[in-house]
Image (cartoon, rainbow, N blue to C red):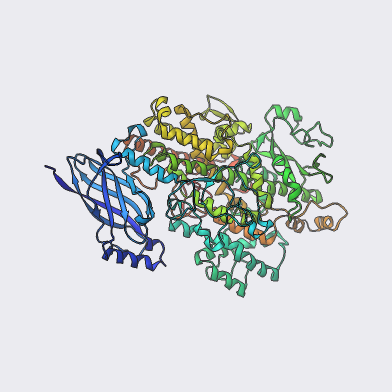
Amino acid sequence: MQESMKIKGSIVLMKKNLFELNDVTASFHDRLDEILGHKVSLQLVSAVNIIHTHDNKVHGKHGKPAILENWTSKTPKTATDAIFDVSFDWDKENDGVPGAFIIKNNHHHEFYLKTLTLEDVPGHGRVHFICYSWVYPAKFYKKDRVFFSNQTYLPSKTPPALKYYREEELESLRGTGTGKLEEWDRVYDYDTYNDLSNPDKGAKYTRHILGGTNEYPYPRRGRTGRPRTKTDPRHEGRLSIFESLKIYVPRDERFNPVKMSDIAAYGLKLIIQFLVPGVKALFDKTFNEFDKIDEIVKLYEGEIKLSDAPVLSSIRDRIPSEMLRELLRTDGEPVLKFPMPQVIKADKSAWRTDEEFAREMLAGINPVVIRRLQKFPKKSKLNPEVEGHKEYNLDGLTVHEAIQNYRLYILDHHDVVMPFLRGINTTATKTYATRTLLFLKEDGTLKPVAIELCLPHPEGDEFEDLSTVYMPAEHGAEGTIWQMAKAYVAVNDSGYHQLISHWLHTHAATEPFIIATNRQLSSMHPIYKLLHPHFRDTMNINALARQTLINGGGLLEKTVFPEKFSMDMSVVVYKEWVFTEQALPADLIKRGMAVEDSQSPHGVRLIIKDYPFAVDGLEIWSAIKTWVKDYCSIYYPTDDIIQEDYELQSWWTEVREKGHGDKKDEPWWPKMQTRNELIESCTTIIWLASALHAAVNFGQYPYGGYLPNRPAMSRRFIPVPGTPDYEELESNPEKAFLKTITSQLLSVLGISLVEILSRHSADEVFLGQRDYPEWTTDEEPQKAFERFGSKLKEIESKFEEMNTNGKWRNRVGPVNMPYTLLYPSSEVGLTGKGIPNSVSI
């Protein structure tokens, strides 16, 4: 005789109307459904006992359906969790331990299911299910929604009772590869960047399709399946501004309401559509240009008054109040004010110094490009063997001696910029391709010794560049021209940073790993559990970027110097992208900034010991790698288990052949046959998504919020002697400098953007933390993760001590701004520190 008993549990969920406060109909419809008997039901699935169905399927035995009771009485008035008791009939002899449950939503509207917890399961005790997923009405699903307990299983170790559902769930997530994807679809699939253009709007808004060809290789993005454009069916149709938030990503990848509110992503598009014309109209009535540096500083001191003109009222009407406060800093008052950027907080003029200019290549927002000079570019006038070379101030060393003694370094943007420069200079932008030569001084700081500014030859690309080398100067016209030369370097570096170091190397490069992980690794898989926290919000932020930032005519094209050539420039760099070189030690070695050294703590020895990004980055890298090694060793004690893990092998094959499909034939891909390959690969993925992104993102406002320090665009070339512009350069150097860099309007636009991008939202989850504590039932991984968190706290204390002991000049610099970008933790807001788990903004 079967002995049935009751298993009591509790469900935690959030109703749709709590997320979308204006959706009154959702609450009404759900209440009506309850009255009509259309309820939410749950069925436990045994992890022990199996049944054979009539169509030869084998899966765990199902318990009787249980109904979620008291739906209408559990409706909090604020956005909080609703907790429901649920009672299951369970045959403890024949059903065994539950390993999954099926949920059917018979309401009209979706809800956000967080957890199910079962207490006192016979012979087992507590069973916890982590869900964190939107559950839509059952009519939208072809297969039942199934959730598994937080037990971790390799495919080969999966109980036979759960294997069917494990495989069926992955099939659902992979989809069919066809059709338009709707908000309730849970499909992860690949597509090229064929959604950046709007040919129906005109040739001005048409860009190349990125990915799928040898000429324009690129990582893949998430497929949406939207209809194609009428003018050119190769391109996917675009959404209107008002539909931006409806762009498809799997619903569980979307921002939660706290995040949506904090970053006000919708407002990014509104900046272009409404804020830019409005502010432009206001500025046109008052002033055209910043005439003095002091006028820029007033942006941060709240001294620029904006009248309550009708256009400003129009802007306020169209932008949510939170977004308005963040962008216009009004708080009800007609004042345009931004927070004081850290780079000018302690000293308003130290940013001008050569030492600070060079220091930011080691400790700024783009510290990943500088290289040790091992040989000069062949045709560069920086090369002593090329005509036009000038003597350098190398503290008594010859050029040869400086190279031999590892004292010469270069920031070289020439080869990336030059192929596009002729076209770029036909736009409003007027700039150069730059190379900067730097010398390592005895005190460990760098000094720039020469800047080469290059232009394409006016008679064609078959002729050599027109090149001019400028040397450091402090006074007169030469001093002003030197400041301008440094500004052109910053313009090149700002564009490279935004398009390549930031967008390509973190946002775009990570998305294929997210898609492949969800398609090929079950949520029960140990590597899924390892990587999943590092994918939070990335697909959503990337989708919004394609809709509003990197698209043809988007905000990024308006605020970086390559303009319409921006994404094509990132393609040039992706052609040289190598996954294994994204690991920090390999990157440092490639750039000549470190050498292999088994005696050094991290396996490499830095050439410049006071290189804050590298010093801090190696500490974080090693902590991540130790955690990954400890974790992987638990589940993969031998290499043969990796080789036999068919989910893992399918995952890695898909990363190579689909996600980064244009690189599928490259010989450098790890074969994923050994534990070391798995550890190194997972460490690299986590590094890209967490620490590297933090290093190149959250300093954007602290360093770049003050445009003279990091101008993103330039509007004219260096004036020629004998011209009115040159006379102005001599008589009013500050005005001449400001007329060269980013205009007033684009300065405000650029500042608005980087301020938003540099903020931590209130729901941020930082490295060493988890969304939820019960992410696995296994004790060893939990203890390893606790050690990881403790190590990060120890590392942060070490960074704090290094920033205050006065020994390391490059950590603070002339601007007295400590390097904090790789501090693991942070508060909410604009802090210039903190490593979120993922590319979440």
Residue 307, located in which quarter of the rendered image?
bottom right
Q: Does the image show residue 787? A: no
Left or right: where 158 falls relative to 582: left
Instruction: Estimate the x, y position of residue 603 in percent, counting from the top left.
Output: 53, 28
The residue lying furthest to the front in this view is 54
> Number of labelled discs?
0
Q: Which of the pair 841/33 is nearer the observer?
A: 33
Q: Residue at x 53, y 35 (%)?
A: 656
Instruction: Estimate the x, y position of residue 214 in percent, counting from the top left.
Output: 64, 39
Left or right: where 615 falls relative to 529: right
Q: Which of the pair 430/522 is nearer the observer?
A: 522
Q: Which of the pair 753/597 is nearer the observer?
A: 753
The image shows residue 207, relative to residue 49, as above or below, that is: below
Instruction: Estimate the x, y position of residue 801 in percent, counting from the top left.
Output: 50, 41
Left or right: where 36 falls relative to 91: right
Q: Residue at x 57, y 65 (%)?
A: 328
Residue 337, located in which quarter of the rendered image?
bottom right
Left or right: where 286 falls relative to 517: right
Instruction: Estimate the x, y position of residue 532 in percent, counting from the top left.
Output: 43, 43
Q: Which of the pair 402/554 is nearer the observer?
A: 554
| Quadrant holding the N terminus | top left
Q: Does the image show residue 710? A: yes
